[in-house]
Each structure stands twice: as structure tokens, then as C-alpha cells.
Image (tube, rainbow, N blue to C red):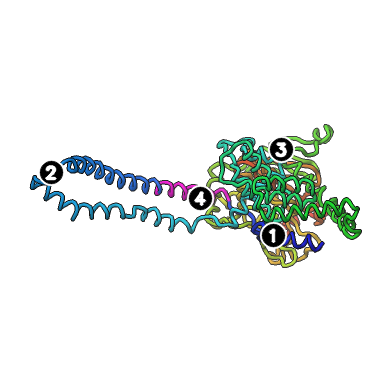
Amino acid sequence: MALNKVWCALALGFLLPFSCAHTDFFTSIGHMTDLINTEKDLVVSLKDYIKAEESKLEQIKKWAEKLDQLTATATKDPEGFLGHPVNAFKLMKRLNTEWGELESLVLKDMSDGFISNMTIQRQFFPNDEDQTGAAKALLRLQDTYNLDTDTLSRGNLPGVKHKSFLTAEDCFELGKIAYTEADYYHTELWMEQALKQLDEGEVSSADKVYILDYLSYAVYQQGDLGKAMALTKRLLELDPEHQRANGNMKYFEYIMAKEKEGNKSSTDSEEQEKETEVKKKDYLPERRKYEMLCRGEGLKMTPRRQKRLFCRYYDGNRNPRYILGPVKQEDEWDKPRIVRFLDIISDEEIETVKELAKPRLSRATVHDPETGKLTTAHYRVSKSAWLSGYESPVVSRINTRIQDLTGLDVSTAEELQVANYGVGGQYEPHFDFARKDEPDAFKELGTGNRIATWLFYMSDVSAGGATVFPEVGASVWPRKGTAVFWYNLFPSGEGDYSTRHAACPVLVGNKWVSNKWLHERGQEFRRPCTLSELE
């Protein structure tokens, strides 16, 4: 055990850089677009610098060619050449004046403009945390959509317009980032992919020795001692003098010998493993359902249940605004009842809402059940903004539309929340309503619990990005210009736990949504209470 601690200490302190950073990638597509424009500006600046350097070299080249011819002639007959008074004068002039001008030209720094632009733009560059977050987003997509490393590395994703691939160096970087998070499972996957690409002949700056160093440790941490030894042997074939690998090999051989003697892990370790296994069993069912639903592998309704789902023209229970022009409505699910409204928000309205929201987009928040205040959370990765009906007639018109079609009072609702889910953006399984153990969740609002949710889809998504309900097996896929609606509470005021839902990670493309959370206050006569708790 002591040796194990020493080896781990060497591995963490000397083998590789180690950090305990816990970051996530919160950048929306809107902000990523700004970065592309920044990079484009830098490329233009770089090309201008290259042109300036080329112009400078061209001048030097012409000067060199002219003098090459002149000196070739002069050195054949120096005395005869200098016998001409003009040649004598020009020699003096060149050496006294023109060579000095050439020296100034050679020393002239043409990079000032480019460096100045770089300095200005650098303030908008992503930092180490952003890069780590982007890598974690890729790993999250890999897990959720069951993508192998080779598929991701080759960029073979559904619905992509601009195919891109990962180099061995990129794979190595992903593996390193996984390592710093003590995620040895993904460290192994990506280090193996980097090694595979190098073995296939890819020219790269990535070093097999470094890759094998990370890989052997990641494999060891996962308990595969035999594979760790094989990888370390391969490392030593490449670098026989590798001090750490030689030390590790001795340690592996020592452990292997101890195992052969039958001295394996203690009873305490076995009990700990059982506890871990129980925890995994408790955790995995919802996670598995969530990921299956995100992949479109959810439960299928029986034909009998499907027959109960209809599409219709809906007039908002004889609302005057919709009697002559009803909207299209279709059932998405029966219990809980989820309905979708089609062509319910126009492209023009969508663009207005997005333009209003873009300058305000910030890391999306959730209600902290203990404090009742908004806070960020690792399980919600998106950017959001809040829009009031007072600031735009478009937002006001949208609020009125929600009220007319739901029959609920929006005066006590929260403002329209606009969210943009970029690379790997998601919102893991959650409830929109406050549970009984969270009595102060919406206390500051003073409008009661969230009775219902209205969700606009303001973009199509090339792949991923579904809204899923793990408790019942429902998957609702984004369709631009539509909205879905469901009640979070029964008429009795009790929470409907079957409405637990999640926003799946965006695999390809980006996802714009806006939602309205309607509250209990003001609905007393619009949706009266029932005597039954679950009705």
C-alpha cells in the first residue's frame, strides 16, 4: 500500500501535470460565431504581414541581384573598373549610404500591425477553462450518443455540413484533459486513439513515449495490471532509459508477484467495491434511460395508447382571437399530457427574440432549493437571457398568445427565458416545479409554484437536442416554429413527478429555445382545484 501511494504520488506530481479544475463549456453558438470572426480578422492581419515581409524581401532580392552582377564585373578587372570615375564615385556612395539604407530595411520590423491586432483581439480569446470545457463537451457527447473515439476523430457525425477530423495531437490533448479530471476511462480511450493514428503513419508532433506514459497509468488506475505492464514494456522499447517507466515496471512486477501469492485486496476493499456497485445501480437506471431517449431508443407506445393521440385545430376554448383562425395542435404524449403547437411563432418573431437576447446571454441558472435563489449548476450547460413584455411588442404579443392558448394568466408568470445550447449544451434530468422539501424555492417571487411550462423551439437541430422525459419514456424533438406545453402540477397543486425532463446535449448544430414558466397565483378560477390529490 505504501509503495502504491509513492507511485501514485510520482504519477500525479511528476508523471503528468495534475489539477483539480472543474470547469464546463458554457459558450453559446452566438459567442462562438464572434470567435470565428475574430480569427478571420487575425488571418487577414497575418496575410497583410506576410505581404509586407514578401515586399521587403523582394526589395532586398532585387538589390542583391543588381549588386551580384555589378561585383561580378568589377572583380574581374578591379583596376580597370575603378579607372572610370563614375564607378569610383558610385562605390563610395553605395558603401557610405546605400548599404546603410539596406541595413535599415533588413532591420525594419514589419510585424507591428499584426502584433498590435493580436494584442487587441487576445482579450476575446478563450482561456484554459474554456478549452477544458470544450473537451468535456466532446466527452459528454461521446457517452450520451455511444460514439466511439474513431467515429469522433474522423468527424463521421450525422447531419454535419463541414466535416472535420481530430489529429493524433488533438486526441492526445483530449486524453490529457480527461486525465486532469481523474477520468481514466476517457484518458485510456483517447490516448489509445492517438497511438492508433500514429501507428497508422500520421505525421504528428505528438510523442508515443508521452502517450504511452499517460496510457499505462490510466490503465493501471482502472485495475488492468497486465495491460499496464505491456504498455510500459512498449514504452521502454522506445526509450530504454525512461526512469519512471523502469520504476513502474519494477512496481508492477512486485504487485504481480504479490497477487500470485494470493495476497489480494483486503475485505475492507471488497466491501467498498460492493458499496460502489450499489451506488452505481442506484444511479444508472435514470442515466441509462436519459441517454437512450437522447439517442431515440426510448420506449415505444403500444398501438392502443397511440390511437389516443390526435392532431386538431385548436381555438383556445373558443378564444375570440382563434375562433376564425385556429392553430394546429398535436398530442406528443398522453401521461403526462404533452401537446405541441405548430407554426406558433414566426421566423420574424424568432429573429427579434434572438436579437433582443444575444447581448444579454449569460450562463444559465437554476433555483437553489436551499436558498431559493438563482445559481449556476454543472448539470445545466447553456446560456440564457430574460425578456420582459414591456420592452418589446413582439415579446408582449408572444405572452398574450401563451395566455390565450393555455387559458392561464401570464401576469404572474416568469419573464420569457431565451436559451442557446451550443457545443454539448444540455440540461440534465430535473423538475420545473418545487418539491415539498423545497418550500422556499420561489418564495421571492410570491406567485406560488410553477404550474405549467411552455417551451418554444426556435431552431431545428441537425442531431441531438431532444427534450426527454425519462420517467415515462417520452422524447420530444426540436422543430423550428413549434412549441410544447405541459402541466407540472396536478389540479390539486401536487407535483406531477412524471414531468421530470431533460434537454439532451446538442450533437451537431445549435439549439435556440425560449420558455415561459407559469405560476399558481392567478389560476384559481382558470384551473380550479380538485379533491383528489393526483387529479
> Judging from the image, what secondary structure is the residue with disc 2 in?
helix
Q: Earlier in the sequence, mark 4 or mark 3?
A: 4
* Residue type marked 4: Leu
Quadrant holding the N terminus: bottom right
What residue is shown at x 12% (from left), y 45% (from top)? 79
Q: Which residue is mark 4?
A: 35
**In whole angstroms, how far apart are the C-alphas of marks 4 and 3?**
40 Å
Q: Closer to us: mark 4 or mark 3?
A: 4
Q: Earlier in the sequence, mark 2 or mark 3?
A: 2
Instruction: Please tell me which residue lies in front, 141 or 436.
Output: 141
Residue 346 locus on image (x, y percent): 57, 42
Q: Earlier in the sequence, mark 2 or mark 4?
A: 4
* Residue type marked 3: Glu
Q: Closer to us: mark 2 or mark 3?
A: 2
- What are the residue bounds of the magenta stretch? 28-45
Question: Quarter-wise, where is residue 476 in the image?
Answer: top right
> Judging from the image, what secondary structure is the residue with disc 4 in?
helix
Q: Which residue is mark 2?
A: 81
Q: Which residue is mark 1?
A: 12
Residue 49 seen in render: yes
